[in-house]
Image (spheres, rainbow, N blue to C red):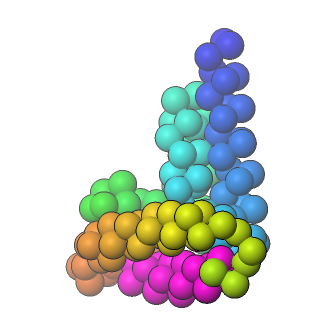
Amino acid sequence: MVITLLWRFFALIFLGIAFAGVILPGLPTTEFLLMALWCSAKGWPQLHHWLLHHPRFGHMIQQWQQHRAIPRRAKVIALVSMTISCCLLFLSGLPLWVKCLSSSMMVAVLYWLITRPEPSNETEVSQMKLKQ
């Protein structure tokens, strides 16, 4: 019982951070959404089902789980938001080492993100059929 409550607690925390990431620039949404999904699978089947079938995020989560695929639109949004974040970072008064370290981490994440496959047309067509 305590373990289930702990999984639910973490699922809610990660879900809250993910939804905050929708509004706040620079705060990632996808990573926290996937962590919420993972925690909910351990202790909250209803939330897990809701996340998998969410009208906005469900399709991308399913694409990731089944094919490790990330849509091109999500990659472009990440590229633009990280570029803006890097520019704002270098305009800030933070120490140079913080600016360089943060920018390097963003470049590494972008490289990883861009090298992930995109959903195939066949996968998208099958998803469209499921929605009808």
- Vertical placement of residue 17 versus 74, above or below: above
Write down the quadrant of residue 84 in the picture: bottom right
Image coordinates of residue 15 in percent, x first then y, are: 68, 50
Q: Does residue 3 show up magenta in the picture?
A: no
Image coordinates of residue 126 in percent, x first then y, are: 31, 74
Image coordinates of residue 72 in percent, x first then y, are: 39, 83
- Vertical placement of residue 9 versus 50, above or below: above
Write down the quadrant of residue 120 in the picture: bottom left
Residue drawn at (50%, 41%), measured in percent from left and top? 38
Residue drawn at (33%, 67%), measured in percent from left and top? 112
Would residue 59 be visible to someone looking at this image? no
Q: Does residue 87 show up magenta in the picture?
A: yes
- Residue furthest to the top in view is 1
Write down the quadrant of residue 69 in the picture: bottom left
The residue lying toward the viewer, choosing from 94 and 122, is: 94
Residue drawn at (43%, 80%), measured in percent from left and top? 75
The residue lying toward the viewer, choosing from 4 and 22, is: 22
The residue lying toward the viewer, choosing from 128 and 57, is: 57
Residue range highlighted in magenta: 70-89
Image coordinates of residue 100 in percent, x first then y, are: 51, 70
Would residue 98 be visible to someone looking at this image? yes
The residue lying toward the viewer, choosing from 62 and 77, is: 77
